[in-house]
Structure formats: C-alpha cells, structure tokens
Image (cartoon, rainbow, N blue to C red):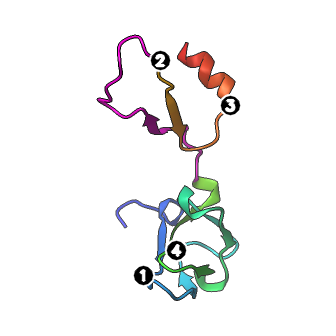
C-alpha cells in the first residue's frame, strides 16, 4: 500500500445492473465501528458504521455508484461553478440586457454571491 493507511483509502461500490436493486455486504479496509460516508454528492446522503470484519451493508439502486471514505477524513470542498448561462460565445444585440445565471455545486446565499460579483 506504499505508505497509504486504511484511513486514507476509499472503497467503491457499484451496481451495473440497469433494472435490479442490489443489497450488498462489502469488505472494506476500516475497523469495526468506523463511520463511513458516500463522498459523491450526486449519490445523496449515505452513511454507515463498519461492522465486524470490516463489512459495510448497503442497498444500491440500478446503475448507482457509491464512493465510501471515513467521515473523519472527509473535508468540505468550497462550492464550484457547475453551469453558466448564457453559454460561452453566445451572441447578443448591442445595447440589449442579458440575464446571467450561475449554478453552483451546492446551495449558495444569493446576497453574498451578488456582493462578490459587483
């Protein structure tokens, strides 16, 4: 593992079936009692406590993926811009006003965003 401790590893679980829900029990590198969370924001909130022998039980919907890590090692990332409208290279008439929309990776306080953009 070249200097990588179990605390700094991740475990990946995926259901590649397009129609069947899977209930799985997965071996992980963490000690019993460790709380793990899904670090993929698209997957929604998921947490579990590692059981005996490093096992984590979970339900995976069709085509669902989870990336697990110990909660104690996960740090919140700053929000990022995920979409802007109008798109790059959009053409608009001179003198016309255009609404600019910015979508972030998580909910933002609109007043703080507006004060930063001014």
Query: Does the magenta portion include 82?
Result: yes
Circle 4 sits on which residue?
A: 29
Circle 1 sits on which residue?
A: 16
Report, in whole angstroms, how far the alpha carbon at label 2 lies from the one at label 3: 24 Å
The answer to which of 111 and 10 lies nearer the viewer is 111
Report, in whole angstroms, how far the alpha carbon at label 3 lies from the one at label 1: 37 Å
The answer to which of 16 and 95 lies nearer the viewer is 95
Q: Earlier in the sequence, mark 2 or mark 3?
A: 2
Please, what secondary structure does the residue beneath circle 4 have?
loop
Please identify the quarter of the rendering in which residue 108 is found.
top right
| Place of residue 42 in the rendered image (x, y in percent of width and height, measured from the top left) | 54, 59
Q: Residue at x 49, y 38 (%)?
A: 80
Please, what secondary structure does the residue beneath circle 1 have?
loop
Please identify the quarter of the rendering in which residue 73 is found.
bottom right
Q: Residue at x 56, y 64 (%)?
A: 43
Q: Earlier in the sequence, mark 3 or mark 1?
A: 1
Circle 2 sits on which residue?
A: 97
Q: Earlier in the sequence, mark 2 or mark 4?
A: 4
Q: Is residue 106 left or right of residue 3?
A: right
């Amino acid at each position: 593992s070249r200097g990588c401790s179990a605390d700094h590893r991740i475990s990946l679980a995926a259901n590649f079936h397009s129609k069947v829900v899977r209930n799985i029990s997965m071996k992980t590198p963490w000690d019993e009692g460790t709380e793990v969370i899904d670090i993929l924001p698209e997957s929604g909130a998921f947490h579990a406590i590692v059981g005996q022998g490093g096992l984590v039980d979970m339900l995976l919907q069709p085509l669902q993926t989870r990336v697990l890590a110990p909660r104690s090692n996960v740090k919140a990332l700053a929000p990022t811009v995920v979409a802007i409208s109008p798109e790059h290279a959009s053409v608009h008439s001179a003198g016309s006003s255009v609404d600019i929309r910015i979508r972030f990776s998580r909910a933002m306080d609109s007043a703080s965003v507006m004060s930063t953009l001014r």
